[in-house]
Structures are given as C-alpha cells and as structure tokens.
Image: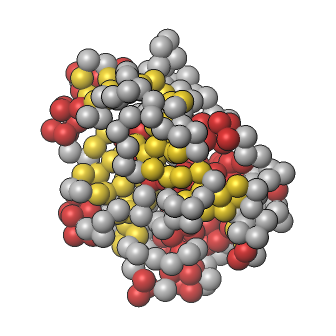
C-alpha cells in the first residue's frame, strides 16, 4: 500500500473503527434499490409523480440495459448533463444497477469533467433518455456486482473531481436518516437540483433508504436551501454556531459534515469552532487528481481547510 493510500485509509478511520467495518445493511447501492423494491413494492418513492418503488426499480433495470446496449461496462463512468426530473434520478440508479459510476457537475463545466473522467457515455437532454430506455427490458441480470468500496459517483466542480464510494453515500445517508428520525411512516419534500452531492443523499438515496416517500402535499418535513424545515447550507464557517435545523455541506465528506452542532454519525471533526480536518467513514475516496490528494490527506486526516 502506498503512503497516500495509507493516509486515506487512516482518514477514513474513526477511533478504532476502521472503514472496512461496514455500518450499513447493504453490500452496494444496487442492493438498496432491489431490497427496497422487495420490501415496499407499490409504495411511492416520488409520490407526486406516481413513481412507486417497483416503477423506479424497473426503470433502473431498463436504464442498465440501455447502458449495456451503448457499450458501457461495470466500473466505467457515465456522465449526465443538465436533465429534468426524473431523468437524472433514473440515470444514477441505472448506473448503480449496472455497477458503473455516475459523473455530474455543480457548475456545468462538462468539458472539464469529460477531460478528467473520460466517461464511456454522455447523457444529454437531446438524447431523450427516458424515451430511449422504454424500448429496453425491465429485467437486468448483473454480471458483476459492485463492492461497497467501489466508486459510485464523481462530482465535478471548480476544477476538482470528488470520488465517492457506495459506502460513502450509504453511510452519510444513514447518518441523516437516524439523526432526523425519518422512517417509512413519514413523508418529506425537497427542493433541489441535480447539481450537488446533497441531491444524491437526500433526493435519490434517502427515500429508498428510509422508505419515506417524497411528497409536497403530504410532507411531514421539508429540505431546501431556503424556506424549509431543514436548510441545506453550502457556505458555513463554524459548526458550533450552526442552528439545529442546518445541514452543513462538505463534499469531501460525502454530502454532510454536521446537522446543527453535531457531526454526522461516524464523522469526527477536529474543532467545531473552526474545523480544519476530519476523520470518519464518510471521508471521500479522494480527488481525481493525485497531487490534490497529497495536499489534503496527511497526518492520518483529511484537511478540508
């Protein structure tokens, strides 16, 4: 193991709990999609759009078959441009069903993302993705299943690519669910575009992980960047000054670093007044650029400032 890999591994430890001691009940994100369909079936995921767990599952299978027809293989990358709902959601679930990873951007720098990630397929608005996948079978048998440590997404923004694993995404979502007590007998609403890691955690994975559908009319609680029960806060300085309903974003920590003043489950922050480094299971796989990784992974920590 190289010195850099050792530093990344140490940063992903929290106390004596190593990152290989998995704290989620799924072996990968595909298993989440499949397992929740078995458990909930006709229960709604995106209630206002009539999309049940079974419907989402079958659309993900169709997407996976479509990707295979376009020559995409497991562990390869698929890039999405600016798509409308639910194209982005079906694309990412289809990518995970196949065992590939999804590349998306926060600033529409598609040229930079393409150059740095070399995706095997690009999905644009002009492709009419949902219309294309309707021609594909809604039954998919994976030849290779992803592991928790495999790459699930690459988020590209400001000239950097953040790589997150299946485990990163699942464990961060788990932290949100348990901190806020969101379960299948509830519903929530969220206003968010598919251009941030919180979109992955809150809009794609949380309704599946918790069993709580997204519904504007029947929401027990709401998420948003403004005017919501829980505020997604991208710009913050101090965790100790946070309000109880603020979800502080840290892309390098797979979405969220804290909810209010409390670090998210299985995340350790060096200084809540002025955070500079973190440890824990949500710590990213790393940046795409190894030189950037050398700068931030040191002393067994991930330095975020």
Q: Is residue 143 visible?
A: no
- The number of discs equals 0
Task: Judge from the rendering whether residue 255 lies leftward or rightward of residue 45; answer left or right.
Answer: left
Q: Nearer the viewer, residue 144 or 192?
A: 192
Q: Nearer the viewer, residue 100 or 144?
A: 100
Q: Position of residue 280 (x, y in %)?
A: 45, 26
Colour scheme of the picture? secondary structure
Q: Is residue 227 visible?
A: yes
- Quadrant that contains the C terminus: top left
Q: Position of residue 161 (x, y in %)?
A: 29, 51
Q: Residue at x 82, y 56 (%)?
A: 40
Q: Position of residue 225 (x, y in %)?
A: 50, 59
Q: Residue at x 49, y 12 (%)?
A: 16
Can you tell which quarter of the image residue 58 is in?
bottom right
Can you tell which quarter of the image residue 52 is in?
bottom right
* On screen, residue 272 above or below 16: below
* On screen, residue 63 above or below 271: below
Q: From this viewpoint, which residue is outermost toward the left? A: 291
Task: Judge from the rendering whether residue 25 lies leftward or rightward of residue 296; answer left or right.
Answer: right
Q: Residue at x 31, y 19 (%)?
A: 300
Can you tell which quarter of the image residue 134 is in?
bottom right
Q: Residue at x 33, y 48 (%)?
A: 162
* On screen, residue 28 above or below 238: below
Task: Judge from the rendering whether residue 135 lies leftward or rightward of residue 152; answer left or right.
Answer: right
* On screen, residue 170 above or below 212: above
Q: Nearer the viewer, residue 225 or 118?
A: 225
Q: Position of residue 55 (x, y in %)?
A: 73, 70
Q: From this viewpoint, which residue is outermost toward the top? A: 16
- Quadrant that contains the N terminus: top left
């Amino acid at each position: 193991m190289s010195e850099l890999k050792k530093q990344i591994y140490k940063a992903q430890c929290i106390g004596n709990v190593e990152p290989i001691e998995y704290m989620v009940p799924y072996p990968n994100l595909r298993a989440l999609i499949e397992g929740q369909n078995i458990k909930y079936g006709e229960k709604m995921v995106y209630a206002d759009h009539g999309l049940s767990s079974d419907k989402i599952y079958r659309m993900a299978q169709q997407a996976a078959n479509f990707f295979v027809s376009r020559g995409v293989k497991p562990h390869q990358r698929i890039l999405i441009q600016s798509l409308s709902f639910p194209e982005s959601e079906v694309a990412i679930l289809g990518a995970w069903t196949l065992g590939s990873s999804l590349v998306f951007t926060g600033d529409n720098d598609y040229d930079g993302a393409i150059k740095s990630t070399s995706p095997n397929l690009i999905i644009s608005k002009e492709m009419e993705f949902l219309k294309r996948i309707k021609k594909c079978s809604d039954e998919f048998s994976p030849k290779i299943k992803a592991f928790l440590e495999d790459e699930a997404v690459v988020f590209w923004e400001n000239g950097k690519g953040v790589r997150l694993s299946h485990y990163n995404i699942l464990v961060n979502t788990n932290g949100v669910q348990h901190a806020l007590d969101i379960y299948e007998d509830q519903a929530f609403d969220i206003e968010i575009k598919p251009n941030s890691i919180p979109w992955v955690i809150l809009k794609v994975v949380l309704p599946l992980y918790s069993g709580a559908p997204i519904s504007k009319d029947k929401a027990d609680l709401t998420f948003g960047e403004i005017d919501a029960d829980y505020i997604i806060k991208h710009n913050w300085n101090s965790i100790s000054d946070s309000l109880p309903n603020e979800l502080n974003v840290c892309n390098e920590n797979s979405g969220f670093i804290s909810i209010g003043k409390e670090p998210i489950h299985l995340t350790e922050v060096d200084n809540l007044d002025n955070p500079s480094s973190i440890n824990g299971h949500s710590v990213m796989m790393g940046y795409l650029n190894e030189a950037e990784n050398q700068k931030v992974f040191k002393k067994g920590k991930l330095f975020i400032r």
